Amino acid sequence: QVQLVQSGAEVKKPGASVKVSCKASGYTFTSYGISWVRQAPGQGLEWMGWISAYNGNTNYAQKLQGRVTMTTDTSTSTAYMELRSLRSDDTAVYYCARVEILGAYFDYWGQGTLVTVSS
Amino acid sequence: DIQMTQSPSTLSASVGDRVTITCRASQSISSWLAWYQQKPGKAPKLLIYDASSLESGVPSRFSGSGSGTEFTLTISSLQPDDFATYYCQQYNSYSGLTFGGGTKVEIK
């Protein structure tokens, strides 16, 4: 069965960086993309960007351009999301989700990773 | 970015009720709309894609309709497991995928 398993919770100081991993199993990793979606405490869902696991092409949300980098390691079927220059309003649960192509819906989701930014 | 507006933001209903949630897009998105269910502390779960296609394994009491700018999610007979928050998501514009603000379905 399809599974996306994310790395554990992180606590970071303002200005630091965080890198969250998402290990996929149960499907051909390079046949799909991975999107990242975050959810601030008590708030709605915000799409952060997408990466093709086939060729590494990326598309990032405009508001995060320059601070976010998404990568994949096809040898381990793992996707990564790095967010830099963290601010308190980056505190959120970060989800990875499988997506067939850029600009589509998310059919499987990881369990979420809480990132807390606090001095 | 395309703005997605859901209504109501909160809905109180009883088991067995028919429930309808509306999602409006700021511009036409054809049928490029999905619906998700999220329970506290859990990841969202895909219910409907392409506005009206039921995801495999999702109970048939869930249905979606609409096209263009107005969409609805209907639960034909609300069950105890359905109390959750529901989100719509547009994927017409791949440069900026956006979600609605959510509708929390509470027990009346």
Image (cartoon, rainbow, N blue to C red):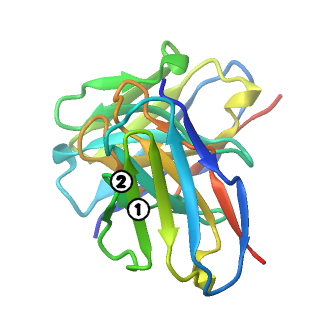
Amino acid carrying mark 1 in the image: Gly
Chain identifier of the residue bearing label 1 in the image: B
Q: Amino acid at mark 2?
A: Ala
Pick whichever, A61 or A88, lies toward us: A61
Residue B85 location (% of width, % of height):
63, 61
Closer to the camera in the image, B72 or B79: B72
- The residue under the point 22% across, 45% down is A32
Task: Answer few, some or many: residues within 10 Å of disc 1's Cα (few below 14, many 20 plus, some between 14 and 19).
Answer: many
Labels in figure, total: 2
Query: What SS does tag 2 mark?
Result: loop
Tell me the number on the disc at residue A80: none
Instruction: For mark 2, name the chain.
Output: B
- Quarter of image, res A45: top right
Residue that numbered label 1 is attached to:
B64
Real-space Cα separation, disc 2 to disc 1, in angstroms: 6 Å
Residue labelled with disc 2: B51
Q: Is residue A29 above or below residue B13?
A: above
Pick the front one: A82 or B8: B8
User: Mark 2, residues whose alpha carbon is within 10 Å: few (<14), some, or many (≥20)?
Assistant: many
Which residue is at a point 28% across and 70% down the rendered structure image?
A1
Residue A13 appears in view: no
Position of residue A104 in the picture relative to residue A112 (left or right): left
Where in the figure is residue A10, as x and y percent of width and height? Answer: 65, 42
Q: In the rendered view of the protein, which quadrant contains the C terminus of chain A?
A: top right
The residue sitting at 38% across, 47% down in the picture is B33
Drawn side of residue A46 relative to residue B105, left or right = left
Looking at the image, the residue that sits furthest to the right is: A119
> Residue B72 location in percent, x, y?
48, 57
> Residues at badges 2 and 1 in contact (C-beta under 8 Å)?
yes
Name the image quarter holding residue A73.
Answer: top left
Q: Earlier in the sequence, mark 2 or mark 1?
A: 2
